[in-house]
Amino acid sequence: MCEGCYGRNMRLFLILFLLAGPALSQDWAVRSADTPLDRQAVMALVEGNTLTFFDDGQSKFSAGGAYSYTYANGGGTAFGRYEVGVDGTVCIAFRNGFGRCDKYVESAGRVVMLTEKGERFPIRP
């Protein structure tokens, strides 16, 4: 990876996220029983915390914007940076150049992460 590319890629990703944010919010597969979390609730959920999923994968959100996802069963760790949008959408720019955005909802008494692809990942209490 070239010197400084990560910083440029992160800035580009965040600009695209801010411009596309309203369009992205229309595409989520939110169910009728889901209550989307607003920005304040998402910040309280993620900032400085580690979320564990039922497959034992863990998303770690550092207060300064650093992000890591550790795969279950010793599958390695992916690193990046995260940003919480005004609508509560969390976008992550990974060091490898990939990125994704997720939405968090409350459903049947638990928090569930929704992906742009329509996948649902409940978070362990």
Image (tube, helix red, strand yellow):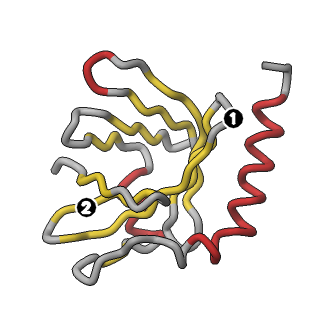
- Tag 2: residue type? Val
Nearer the observer: mark 2 or 1; the answer is 1
* Residue lying at 25% horizontally and 42% vertically, measured from the top left: 53
Return the mark for residue 111: 2
Percent position of residue 122, x then y: 24, 54
Of the two numbered discs 2 and 1 on the same chain, state the one appearing first in sequence. Answer: 1
Relative to residue 125, is residue 91 drawn left or right? right
The correct choice, above or below, for 31 with respect to 51 in the image is below
Percent position of residue 66, x then y: 56, 37
* Residue lying at 80% horizontally and 49% vertically, measured from the top left: 12
The answer to which image quadrant residue 4 occupies is top right
Residue ranking furthest to the bottom:
32
Characterize the local packing of mark 1: few (<14), some (14-19) or many (20 or more) Cα atoms within 10 angstroms: few
Characterize the local packing of mark 2: few (<14), some (14-19) or many (20 or more) Cα atoms within 10 angstroms: many
Return the mark for residue 10: none
Percent position of residue 105, x then y: 32, 68
Q: Which residue is mark 1?
A: 97
Relative to residue 1, is residue 36 drawn left or right? left
* Residue lying at 82% horizontally and 30% vertically, measured from the top left: 5
* Residue lying at 70% horizontally and 68% vertically, measured from the top left: 20
Depth check: 80 or 72 in front? 72
Percent position of residue 93, x then y: 63, 42
The answer to which image quadrant residue 114 occupies is bottom left
The correct choice, above or below, for 114 with respect to 2 in the image is below
- Tag 1: residue type? Gly
Q: Give SS at disc 1.
A: loop
The correct choice, above or below, for 76 with respect to 34 in the image is above
